[in-house]
Image (cartoon, rainbow, N blue to C red):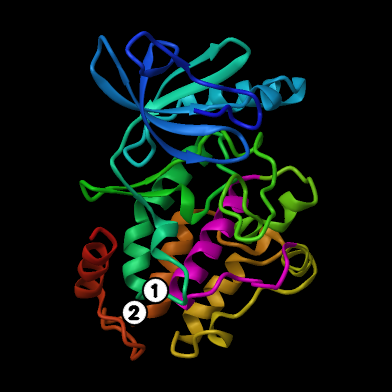
Amino acid sequence: MPPHPNGSRPAENGNGHRNIGGYRLLRELDTDSLGSVYEAEHPRLHRRVALRTIGTGVARDVSFSRRFLLELRSYTALEHEAIPRLYELAYEGDSPYLVTEFVAGSTFDGMLGDGQRYEPLGIIDLLRPIASALDYAHSRATVHRDVKPANILLAEDGRTLLTGFGLGTVASFNTGPGASGPVAPDYVAPERLVGREVDGRADVYSLAAVIFEATTGRRPFSSKSWIETLSRRLYEPPPNVREVAADLSPAFAAVLQLAMDRDPARRPATAGELLDRLEAAITSPNGKVQPNGVVPKRARRALRKLLRR
C-alpha cells in the first residue's frame, strides 16, 4: 500500500495484514486531507472499529497537535446514541490515530447530487437524531464545526449518526472542485470563514445548508468556482429555497433562510429549534399538511426505506 501523502503508512505483520497499533486493518473506507479511515479489528478483543489515521506531516504541526488534543478531550466526554463512541487515542510513531465505534452503513452525501430531492418532512425526521446530538454536544461546550452530508451516517440498523467530532477545528478547508473531504465550503458558516470564534449556531447554519440541498437538489450558493462560493457566502444574503424549488412553502423557506443568516444572533438558537420551526412551517395547526406535496408519516417511512436500499 502506498504511503499517505502526509507520510503515514500502515505496517505489515508476518501474515501480510496491515496493522496500526494493535489493530488489524480490514479495508480502507475513506481518504482525505488529514489521513485515512479504515475498518479495523482488535485481534484479541475481536471488536470491529473505525480507525482514523492522521498523516505525519499534519501531526508535526505544533498548533495542530494542541488543537487536536483539545478537541479529542471534549469528544471523549460525549455519550449520545447518535454519536459514535470514541474508544482510544494513541500514536503509531509520530502519527496519532483515533479508534471509534464502527457502524455499518453509508453516508448521506451518497444520496445527494444530480438534482435529487427529498420530501421536507422526511428529511426533518431523518435529521432529528443529528439535531439531538448537536444540541447535546453544545450543552457540553462542544461545537462540531463540520456538519455536512459526508458526516451524516445512515446505519444499516436504521440509526442516523453524526461522525467527525474532534476533527472540525484541525481540518484544513478542502476547497477543490467537488470537495468532500474535511470542511467542504458549501456548508460552513460565514463567521468561521473569517476566523471568528464560533458557537453552536455555526452548526445550526451548516445543518440548514444540508436541509437546503436535500430539499432542493442544489447546494446553497452553488457557483462555478469555490472562490465564488466563499465570496457569495460572506457577502450575499442567504438564498431562498423557493428560487430553486418553487413548490416549497413560503413559511418553510423563511425559516430556512433565517437559519442561514450571516448574523448568528438571527438564527434559531438550537438545532432542535430549527427542525421544530421547519416542521411547524409545513404543518397547519390542526396537524394537516399544507398543500405542497408532503405526506408526513408515510413520506418519512418511504424516505428511510429509499435511503437505506
Indicate the position of residue 20 as horizontal and vertical percent values. 45, 16
59 in the magenta segment? no
Q: Which residue is mark 2?
A: 283
Magenta stretch secondary structure, dominant: helix
Indicate the position of residue 24 as horizontal and vertical percent values. 35, 18
In this rendering, position of residue 132 left or right of residue 244 = left
In this rendering, position of residue 190 left or right of residue 46 = right
Q: CA distance from mark 1 to mark 2?
A: 5 Å
Look at the picture and state if 124 lies above or below 79. below
Rendered image quadrant of residue 170: top right
Q: Nearer the viewer, residue 253 or 15?
A: 15
Rendered image quadrant of residue 231: bottom right
Mark 2 crowdedness (10 Å alpha carbons): few <14, some 14-19, many ≥20: many
The range drawn in magenta is 199-226
Indicate the position of residue 3 as horizontal and vertical percent values. 58, 27
Where disc 2 sits, the SS reads loop
Look at the picture and state if 144 lies above or below 23. below
204 in the magenta segment? yes
Q: Which residue is mark 1?
A: 280
Indicate the position of residue 220 as horizontal and vertical percent values. 61, 71
In this rendering, position of residue 273 left or right of residue 106 = right
